[in-house]
Image (cartoon, rainbow, N blue to C red):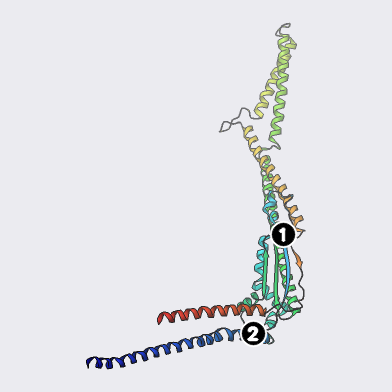
Amino acid sequence: MTSAKNDKQSEPKGKVLALGNAAATAASDRQENRRPSRLLVSFILCVVLPLMAATLYYAFFATDRYAARAGFSIRGIDTNAGIDGIGALTGLASTGSTTSDSYIVLSYLGSRELLEAVDLELGLRGVYSSREVDPLSRLDADATVEDFLEYWNRRIYTQFDPTSGIIEFEVQSFSPEHAQEMAASVLRLTQTLVNELSANARRDALRFAREEVELQEARLRQALSAIRDFRASEQSVDPSASAALEIELIASLEARLIDVNARIAALRQTLDENAPSLTALRRNAEALAAQIVERREAIGSEVLGESGVSAVSQQLALYEELEVERSLAQQAYASALTSLEQARRDADRQQRYLAVHLQPQAPESAQYPRSIRNLLILGFALVAAWGIGALMTYSVRDHLT
């Protein structure tokens, strides 16, 4: 009795447990069946619809853009030969280096100055903001200068090869003729910029050379004025020449005195001391000795200054200093004149010029937008983003359950 009763009580419990497991299994199956449908819906929303919208845009709405290209390089004339030290300081010795000019041009191609010049010439704002252009490619009619410049930098592409110095650029517009006109205008304005750089370099070189000539000329004038003042104060045209003449004259008198003394000594052996000829020779010797003393006193050999140096020596030292300064001033002035003439010759030649190797041509077909490539890139990006998002979503959901 007891065992039968226990069997009856245990039967309903087994049946209830079986029903609960079946319900959980059915719910799990329904959830698994709903997952593919949610995944498909997310794929359609995140990938298919945006890709279809992009396809419709490129197929029916996107405005064709035409591109015109041009290429050039900046060349310089080497003027190093024949330039002296002062000429090298003028900057002409480094005009062959045009790498920095190339980077200046690259910056100019994306600058507001170029944009405003081309806009003034060709009316870029009106072309880019035309109603015929699709909204995604159109410039806002009320765009600020900064927005216009940002739009311009999306319509111009530049390439620079530092090894060869070649610069190429591409401009885009919505008609072949306008694209060619834009490229020609940009090329012409760039050439004007390079010419201005060359002209500025020539003006700077000539200005420095002229200033150097004026400086050395003033130095030479000052040296000549000092010599003139010295001659006026010392009453001597050339103290060194005067001193040399006086020394030569004293040497001549001393030679004559030696000769007279020799004759006196010879006559004393044969004649009396009071002989007329011997007396005349002695008077002659006395006169020569007096002349020698007078000449020596005239050149100041016996007059010493405060430093113990004779007045003539001081005069000669001062005059030699003035002469050295005059000589140096003359050499510097001559070198400055040579540099000025060299600068003038170089100024007659163009230091920098634009060597164009690729002239702008009117395109025959639109190169932009590149629909197939853009669609492929967009499709890959959408699929990658959707896949990563789906994996992250289900990974988080599985960890929570």
Is residue 230 visible in the rendered image? The answer is: no
Give the x, y percent position of residue 87.
70, 52
For image coordinates 73% across by 60% down, the residue present is 75
**Closer to the camera, 196 or 50?**
50
Of callouts 1 and 2, the N-terminal one: 2
The residue tagged with tag 2: helix, strand or loop?
Answer: helix
State which quadrant residue 287 falls in. top right
User: 143 above or below 9?
Assistant: above
**Closer to the camera, 303 or 353?**
353
**Closer to the camera, 350 or 48?**
48
Which residue position holds label 1? 202
Give the x, y percent position of residue 193.
70, 67
Give the x, y percent position of residue 63.
69, 83
State which quadrant residue 175 falls in. bottom right
Give the x, y percent position of residue 258.
71, 17
The residue tagged with tag 1: helix, strand or loop?
Answer: helix
For image coordinates 73% across by 14% down, the residue present is 281
In the image: residue 379, left or right of residue 98:
left
User: 33 above or below 326?
Assistant: below
State which quadrant residue 366 falls in. bottom right
Indicate the amino acid at tag 2: Thr
Which residue position holds label 2? 55
Tell me the quadrant of the picture where the C terminus can be found: bottom left
Indicate the amino acid at tag 1: Arg
Task: Kindly identify which numbered label has been placed on residue 81.
Answer: none
* Front disc: 1 or 2: 2
